[in-house]
Amino acid sequence: MNIQKNISLKKYNTFGIDVIANRFVEINSLSDLKKIIASEKDLFLIGGGSNMLLTSNINKLVVHLNLKGIIVNDTEKEFVFVTAEAGENWHEFVLWCISQNYGGLENLSLIPGNVGTSPIQNIGAYGVEIKDTFYQLEALEIATGKIKTFTKEACNFGYRNSVFKNELKNKYIIINVTFKLTKNHHKTNISYGAIKTYLQNISEPNIKDISNAVISIRESKLPNPKEIGNSGSFFKNPIINKELFQNLNKKYPNIPNYIISENEIKIPAGWLIEQCGFKGKRFGDTGVHEKQALVLVNYGNATGEEIYNLAKKIQETVKSNFHINLEMEVNII
Ligand code: EPU
């Protein structure tokens, strides 16, 4: 294992923020990972770096988890169990599953990040979340070095949420994830409006068609992190109560909304931010994406602090205009 000194993390985070890791190590095997956690207690894990905003240099040992490999367990008639190591790139993994005709992940095409971090916030898009196909994961307990298996129930998945963002935060390192995928795809999900529209001329869309639709829709409104630094949705879509919704609805009859339950209504944060006039606005090297107001961007040399300050300004404006608290989805480091 080669522990390097003073490494820029710019290429390890999709926001492209240039902070320095005092010490940095690339981990390619489970045995090396075990050695590292036995000798170092203060670690900073980095996988795909797609859901973090780095606001200062990192004094802990930065561990870049690069475990690779995919194993298929094909013993059932209808399903196949596919286990991917944490360091597999998410989108490449999704494409590989589609190439094998394994269904269930196609709606999650083109999401940045790695397999190992996908359960932490239960990544989701276009009507599907990973909890829908998740079977189990294995994780290394940092305090003991023991490997523990987590079932779906144990992960306690919610909207952009799991046990790994709450009581087990920073206690485990996810080393692999197993998905239960379909061999015959009776239950594809094309309920999302834009996908339906895209596929209207295909009578029986297959999982590849759905993936292509998702890729095309995402490319049309979300910036490619390789071109413009970003972390996808910066905020969660807030859930408000009925009373506040009814008040807002009087003033804004066109407010988009999704009814979750009798007293819970989800409002797209992108709409709120756009109404506050931020969409497409640029402030130095940071700004709000022109096609999706939920995405904050780094045009080149923005600092994490500048992006964080913009996020705070957005939160304050949304709060004063709509009485809604926007919660950041991205981890602020
Ligand atoms: N909207 C606006 N202005 C905007 C953006 C959105 O008015 O600038 C309104 C429109 O009414 C639109 C509605 O918001 O119809 C929903 O927009 P969109 O379909 O783009 O979805 P979203 O709710 O903004 C969520 C996820 C995305 C995911 C899409 C598609 C969250 C926080 N974000 O965004 O996830 O791709 O749905 O399923 O739940 C990510 O997490 O990085 C991400 C991109």
Image (spheres, rainbow, N blue to C red):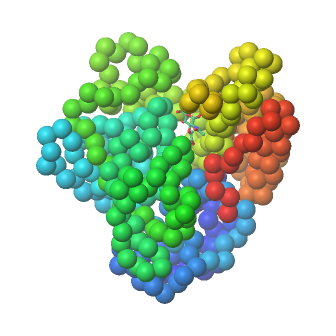
Q: Name the quadrant where ligand 1 sits.
A: top right
**Which quadrant would the C terminus be assigned to in this image?**
bottom right
Q: Where is residue 11 in the image (x, y as percent from the top left)?
A: 58, 60
User: Which residue is depicted at the point 51% across and 70% down?
Assistant: 171
Q: Where is residue 181 in the image (x, y as percent from the top left)?
A: 28, 42
282 vs 143, left or right, is right
270 vs 262, left or right, is right
User: Which residue is depicted at the point 48% across and 24% down?
Assistant: 192
Against 40, residue 331 (above or below) is above
User: Which residue is depicted at the point 33% across and 28% down?
Assistant: 188
User: Which residue is depicted at the point 76% across and 47% down?
Assistant: 311
47 vs 332, left or right, is left
Q: Position of residue 149 (x, y in %)?
A: 34, 64
Against 23, residue 73 (above or below) is above
> Which sits in the foreground, 319 or 271?
319
Q: Where is residue 248 in the image (x, y as percent from the top left)?
A: 77, 24
> Which sits in the foreground, 82 or 50?
82
Against 36, residue 103 (above or below) is above
Q: Is residue 67 visible?
A: no
**Which quadrant would the N terminus be assigned to in this image?**
bottom left
